[in-house]
């Protein structure tokens, strides 16, 4: 294994998994809440919020990375204040997690929103007529029924975060051992003459991880959906 995967490549792989894991773990609760709001509520600015959520999908990734740098860089309008309390995101692996979360967030929210929209509102209304508080209706009715979509959104977001490149390299650069993830490692190897074979190994590894994540998502999603149907 060490002959096939160099130590620096293994380091990039571990960092990619850590970045993607933190990105999804930190953004999933907010993504669930926002997806439910967009699916169930109508309010002034609903369309604007929906556009803002999906904006990272439309903007070129380096633009998103630049906006993150302007906002969370050491001289950014939020980054300067964070630096005063010891939190630095620019050119750190935590900044890579932030960039990955921003880029994965639209895909995650979209999948979860569709899952909430597929839940029969009559079931929620029936629970409400029994005097169940709204937060409990959400936790005991809406969320369990939407779990396959939540899982699909989380895994899709994880796969996206794992492959994030443009915003990451713009915001945190490509520092070996600190911010060099698997995609930036592939970019680095491809920039070296004769690095095609090395890059191919990393590409195969990336495809294998992404495929495994999607297959796991499909299997778990089917299992949850079957369990939910069995309880009805």
Image (cartoon, grey):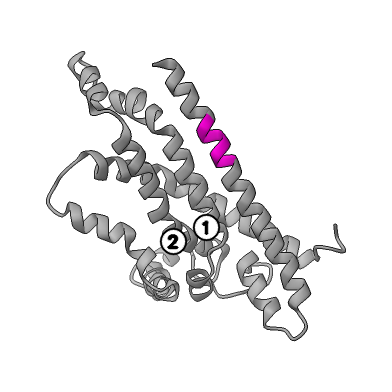
Which numbered disc covers residue 119?
A: none
Q: Residue at x 32, y 35 (%)?
A: 118
Tell which of 168 and 155 is nearer to you: 155
Q: What is the secondary structure assignment of the residue under circle 2?
A: helix
Q: Residue at x 53, y 51 (%)?
A: 158
On the image, the x and y values in percent for residue 178 come to: 64, 67
Q: Residue furthest top?
A: 130
The quadrant of the image that shows the N terminus is bottom right
Q: Where, by quadrant of the figure, is residue 165 drawn?
A: bottom right
Q: CA distance from mark 2 to mark 1?
A: 7 Å
Q: Are marks 2 and 1 in contact (CB under 8 Å)?
A: yes
Tell which of 116 and 48 is nearer to you: 116
On the image, the x and y values in percent for residue 227 come to: 49, 22
Task: Using the image, determine if residue 3 lies above or below residue 147.
Answer: below
Question: What range of the chain is rendered magenta?
Answer: 216-222
Q: Residue at x 26, y 41 (%)?
A: 39
> Would you name the residue on which mark 1 appears?
161
Task: Using the image, determine if residue 82 lies above or below residue 133.
Answer: below
Is residue 86 visible to us here? Answer: no
> Would you name the residue on which mark 2 appears?
103
On the image, the x and y values in percent for residue 56 come to: 37, 64
Q: Residue at x 49, y 75 (%)?
A: 170
């Amino acid at each position: 294994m060490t002959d096939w995967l160099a130590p620096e490549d293994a380091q990039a792989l571990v960092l990619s998994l850590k970045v993607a894991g933190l990105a999804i773990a930190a953004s999933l609760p907010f993504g669930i809440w926002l997806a439910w709001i967009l699916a169930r509520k109508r309010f002034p600015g609903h369309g604007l919020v929906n556009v803002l959520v999906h904006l990272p999908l439309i903007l070129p990734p380096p633009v998103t990375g630049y906006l993150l740098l302007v906002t969370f860089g050491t001289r950014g309008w939020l980054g300067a204040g964070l630096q005063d309390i010891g939190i630095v995101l620019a050119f750190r692996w935590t900044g890579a997690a932030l960039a990955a979360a921003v880029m994965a967030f639209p895909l995650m929210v979209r999948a979860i929103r569709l899952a909430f929209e597929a839940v029969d509102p009559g079931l929620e209304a029936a629970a409400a007529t029994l005097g169940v508080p709204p937060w409990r209706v959400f936790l005991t009715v809406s969320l369990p029924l939407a779990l396959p979509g939540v899982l699909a959104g989380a895994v899709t977001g994880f796969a996206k975060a794992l492959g994030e490149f443009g915003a990451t390299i713009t915001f945190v650069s490509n520092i070996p051992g600190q911010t060099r993830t698997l995609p930036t490692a592939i970019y680095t190897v491809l920039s070296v003459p004769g690095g095609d074979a090395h890059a191919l190994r990393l590409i195969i590894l990336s495809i294998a991880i992404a495929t495994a994540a999607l297959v796991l998502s499909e299997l778990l999603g089917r299992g949850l959906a079957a369990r939910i149907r069995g309880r009805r």
